[in-house]
Image (tube, rainbow, N blue to C red):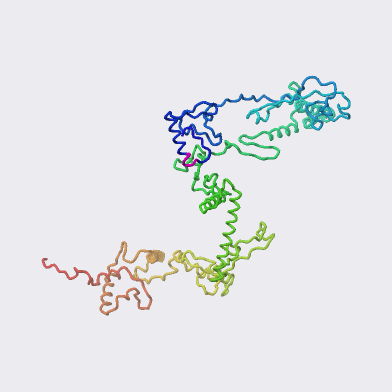
Amino acid sequence: MASATAIGKLSREEFRRQKELDAARKAGTAPAALDEEGKPINPHIPQYISQVPWYLDSGAPTLAHQRRHEEKPKDSLDNWYDRGARAGPAAKKYRKGACENCGALTHKKQDCLERPRKKGAKYTNRNIAADEVIQDVEVGYDAKRDRWNGYDAGEYKQIYDEYNALEAARQKLREEEIDAQTTTDLAAVRKVAKAGKEKNEYDFGSSDEEDEDEEKYADAADAVGQKVDTKTRITVRNLRIREDTAKYLLNLDPESAYYDPKTRSMRDAPVKSSDPEEAKFAGENFTRHTGEAPDMQNLQLFAWTSQTHGSEVHLNANPTAGELLHKEYQKKKEELKGTTKSSILSKYGGEQYLEKAPKELLQGQTEEYVEYSRTGQVVKGRERAKARSKYAEDVYINNHTAVWGSWFDPQTGQWGFACCHSVIHASYCTGLAGIQATHASSAQSLLAAPASASMPPPASTKPLAESSRPRDDADEEDLEERKKRAERLFSKERVGEGEVRLDREKLARAIQEERKRKVRGEEEEERGGKKKKGGEASEVTEEELEAYRMTRRMTEDPMANYVDTEL
């Protein structure tokens, strides 16, 4: 339907007639439709071209919306009212309907801008003002919004002249102060020196007032990337300062958060290991979930949920109504939760288990203010009580002057008393004597002590002729023998190990003694402590150990009873 411009909805019969008319026009059996200028409209034009938009539809077929309209001539920015223009010479006599004050016909008395006269021009017929030129200036879009349109640059000359007059007065005042100054102090002269001087004049130096003026001018200047109002001290950030690090430079790893250069956004955090609260930039997603952003998201979600339930809530169309409905919904939800909780508690009980302990007891924190001095004493407030142990503290028992556990023995790995070095818990204090006894009985003291103090001198088994040697040689041999015996006792080397030197006579006597012992039937386990006639215990010698090995029968040896018959 190329020419269909129906207003409203057509009935079925009207729609059928319109279809038949369009088909007849296309076939050429019916005349084409005419527009408002009487020109025929081609019936083969598509409907999306011939159909008029709803805001331009006049009810008649037309193609005016597809034609180019004549553009109006653009007005220049300099087109403005002629200020103070007068129309011709002033009148000689007062005219009826003119201003009673000045006599101009273009305005009334209440709109007159001249000074009110004592007697108006209506009564004096003198000094009648000329009529103003009534101008009708049509400005365009740009000229209407130009804040400097119509400004006369010549008006700035008044401000310039006023500033020069002030500077001249200030300069004159400073020169008078310099003339009245009688001191020769250079600092005082600089303080009152004039600020504005010509280039050829002698300059005393810059004054403090000049520095203050320069600081004021510097404060009034706008910083880079900021729009500053020096009167209200309000700063509006409109550009990123060049000193700030860009988002994509916080982490140069290409596998880190993605940066969208078109929207200048980085949704994830560039450094994921850092704390978002302390990070310089934690990503747009973190900012999106802080502040009032979550509340806005909840409000939008409530609007969508309400629309699904049939409620006409639109956040963008009517945000105030949406927020009020959301608050009402939250209030009803809390009331319903409270009634549900109270009904459950009234039916089943257990309200006492829902009571929480005070926050001070749970976290161990209070708001009590306490001030301490440098020595640790309480200056202001009440000091917190110290925690006490369930065991008795600083209680001395059995005449001890130190508590149990005040001393540690590194050699034995035991704790004891520091007053007597006793490692027995319920022992009686022995004081300094106990410390000396403990030190003397230690392994280091025993090893460091001379061998003669711990071992009795061996019995002499040498003949009388040998014993008749000088006393000094005998003492030296005995001392060497005792040293060797002490080294063998306190060394880690066991008997029979290493290089062994056996005495044949002692070995023969040891074999005889071992055979006699076996004949008597003595037990083998009693070999560890051989006793002498006097009842004193003696150590096993190398000869006795060798005799025991030689006379022992090796029953566990499979070759013990083997006899070679071939020999």
Q: Which one is in front, 539 or 92?
A: 92
Residue toward you, 73 or 499: 73
Image coords of residue 264 (percent x, y): 52, 39
Vertical relation: 42 (above or below) 334 = above
Query: Measuring 68% from the left and 27% from the top, which residue is drawn there?
Result: 149
Provide residue 62's location: percent of width, then percent of height: 52, 30
Q: Which residues are magenta?
A: 10-14
Front residue of 493/264: it is 264
Q: Camera-side residue: 253 or 321?
A: 321
Q: Position of residue 410 (x, y in %)?
A: 48, 64
In the image, residue 425 sits, relative to residue 102, either above or below, namely below
Residue 231 in picture, x, y percent from top left: 71, 38
Is residue 44 at all visible to an observer of this figure? no
The quarter of the image holding the C terminus is bottom left
**The quarter of the displayed image where residue 538 is located:** bottom left
Residue 540 visible in this rendered orientation of the protein: yes
Which residue is located at x 13 percent, y 67 percent?
A: 564
Q: In this image, 392 relative to 213: left or right? A: left
**Residue 10 horizontal side relative to residue 225, left or right:** left
Give above or below for 466 relative to 283: below
- State which quadrant residue 554 falls in: bottom left
Is residue 277 part of the magenta span, yes or no?
no
The stretch drawn in magenta includes residue 11: yes
Q: Main secondary structure of the magenta part?
A: helix
